[in-house]
Image: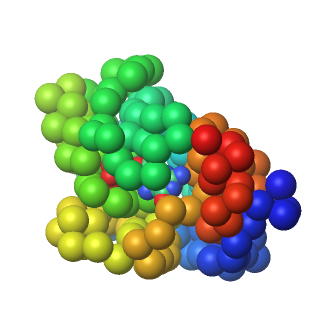
């Protein structure tokens, strides 16, 4: 797997430092006086890509949160570009009146956030915020409003730390690009 890496964009140490900072910011924003109504908080990772990021993040948020799950597919199989976001699964619990924080791995076309935010609002969430680990340098991503961003990255296809290519590479600890040989072999 190491031989498939073209370039390490963000190392596991850089990720760990930034995740700690994001967790501190999110904790402060969900604690009085910033959260005066003392409302319930539900954190919703968008599966599959966000599962590792969310796992690391929530263990540094010392608040009484609940977890909901949404599964959305945008890059099915060996796609290197978004094929449009499709909701595949929903296990949210009752989010009526809850402050929902969506967690996604990467903001690219914005299709996933635009698909999911209205669903949470229709289910009666009191507020919906979103946190992405990575944001690509492209207009569609910059124009999609999100509340927390871990890192700005170039508009390249990346894997690792939960992000996949054809469902491989999610277990790489760093965020990396793949070489052409690996992209061909794992297609
Ligand atoms: P959007 O809906 O904003 O276009 O893209 C978000 C989703 O597309 C992410 O949750 C992720 O699943 C997928 N995606 C976007 N860019 C990349 C990428 O560079 N690498 C991988 N592995 N997935 C990506
Ligand atoms: Mg995704």
With 62 as the anchor, is 138 left or right in this view?
Answer: left
Q: How is the image coloured?
A: rainbow
Instruction: Quadrant for the C terminus, please.
Output: top right
Instruction: Quadrant for the N terminus, please.
Output: bottom right
**Residue visible at 27% across and 66% down?**
141
Relative to 71, does residue 144 appear above or below in the rendering? Answer: below
Residue 46 found in image quarter: top left
Can the viewer see residue 38 in this picture?
no
Residue 97 found in image quarter: top left
**Residue visible at 77% across and 61% down?**
4
Can the viewer see residue 169 in this picture?
yes
* Tally of numbered discs: 0
- Between 38 and 170, the one lying in front of the other is 170
- Between 32 and 81, the one lying in front of the other is 81
**Residue visible at 52% across and 35% down?**
77
Q: Position of residue 130 (x, y in %)?
A: 34, 55
Furthest toward the right, the residue is: 2
With 145 as the anchor, is 57 left or right in this view?
Answer: right
Q: Position of residue 47 (x, y in %)?
A: 50, 36
Q: Position of residue 165 (x, y in %)?
A: 60, 47
Relative to 130, does residue 138 appear above or below in the rendering? Answer: below
- Between 175 and 55, the one lying in front of the other is 175
- Between 174 and 102, the one lying in front of the other is 174
Q: Position of residue 69 (x, y in %)?
A: 47, 30
């Amino acid at each position: 797997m190491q031989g498939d890496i073209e370039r390490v964009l963000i190392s596991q140490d850089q990720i760990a430092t930034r995740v700690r900072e994001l967790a501190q910011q999110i904790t402060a924003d969900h604690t009085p006086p910033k959260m005066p109504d003392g409302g319930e908080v539900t954190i919703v990772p968008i599966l599959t890509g966000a599962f590792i990021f969310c796992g690391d993040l929530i263990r540094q948020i010392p608040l009484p949160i609940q977890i909901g799950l949404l599964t959305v597919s945008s890059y099915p199989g060996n796609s290197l570009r978004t094929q449009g976001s499709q909701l595949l699964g929903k296990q949210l619990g009752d989010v009526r009146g809850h402050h929902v924080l969506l967690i996604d791995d990467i903001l690219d076309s914005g299709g996933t956030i635009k698909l999911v935010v209205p669903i949470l609002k229709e289910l009666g969430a009191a507020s919906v915020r979103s946190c992405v680990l990575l944001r690509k340098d492209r207009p569609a991503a910059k124009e999609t409003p999100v509340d927390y961003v871990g890192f700005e990255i170039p508009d390249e296809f990346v894997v690792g730390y939960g992000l996949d290519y054809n469902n491989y590479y999610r277990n790489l600890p760093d965020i990396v690009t793949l070489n052409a040989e690996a992209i061909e072999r794992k297609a």
